[in-house]
Image (cartoon, helix red, strand yellow):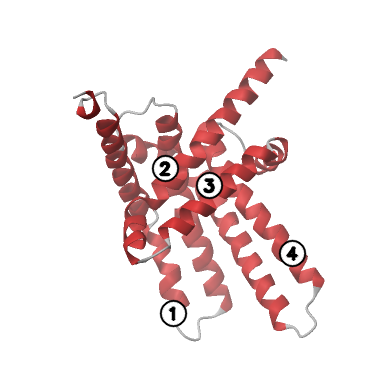
Amino acid sequence: MKLFSIDGPVYKFLSRLWDILRLDLCFVIGALPAAAYFICANLENVPLPVSVLVLLFSGFFIGASATASFVITLKMAAETEGYIFKPFIKAYKENFLKGGAIGSIHVLLIQAAFLSFQIFNATEDGNTYFLIMAILCTVMAVFAFIYAYPLTARYENTIPGTLKNSLRISVRYIGRTLLAVIIVALLIAVFSWNSTLIFIGLLIAPGTIFLAISGIVNYIFADIERKNKEE
């Protein structure tokens, strides 16, 4: 039957699922040093400078691993990928410093948003300044995740240039940016629904989210490249 043939939808689905499982394994191994943050967070009397350093250290490895994952999923979305492990290792090495630096900035934004929300909720009357800071940090952190890692994975640029382009793209393609945010939020909600889906999420959630974002980002990159050629 064509349904179960090598060109059928069942085979393609299982093949893609297998690719995502392998990619998730690579991502987790690449980001494994980030476990130091969760260990540090459960310890008492950890000095603030140490906590900040551990946070930056954790974000660095998450960023490097996420960038390498996007190198793979951008190709997956364009249906031009081949192997998983060797290309991931190659991309991890090539983007280690830039992807890691962006990851550190990313986790700082997330932490700043979290602390600002906490301070806002802790005050009796609330301080609008901290609420604004929390919202701004959250928005920047979301946009950085959607565009900064794929930009690093695909193009050569400085870190400030990558972050600037990330914000420009997020505004220029605001509709697709919001679509990506909604899709990611829905995927997180689904994988957090119950214990069974949480277990499944541990296996495929990162790769699924990276792939979903890559499908949207590929269109944007192609559109930008086309317009630059026309100009």
Total number of numbered labels? 4
- According to the picture, the residue beneath numbered tag 1 turns out to be 42
Q: Amino acid at mark 3?
A: Ile
Disc 1 + disc 3, Cβ < 8 Å: no
Report how far apart the C-alphas of labels 2 and 1 lie in the structure. Answer: 29 Å
Instruction: List the single residue furthest toward the left.
Output: 1
Other residues around mark 1 within 10 Å, as few (<14) / some (14–19) / many (≥20): few
**Would you say 224 lies left or right of 17 here?**
right
Most foreground residue, 41 or 139: 139
Report how far apart the C-alphas of labels 1 and 3 lie in the structure. Answer: 32 Å
Give the residue displayed 67% in from the left and 39% down from the top: 175
- According to the picture, the residue beneath numbered tag 2 turns out to be 69
Quarter of the image for residue 79 reads top left
Report how far apart the C-alphas of labels 3 and 2 lie in the structure. Answer: 18 Å
- According to the picture, the residue beneath numbered tag 4 turns out to be 133
Report how far apart the C-alphas of labels 1 and 4 lie in the structure. Answer: 27 Å
- According to the picture, the residue beneath numbered tag 3 turns out to be 183
51 is higher (above) or lower (below) than 3: below
Question: Looking at the rendering, in which quadrant would you find the C terminus?
Answer: top right
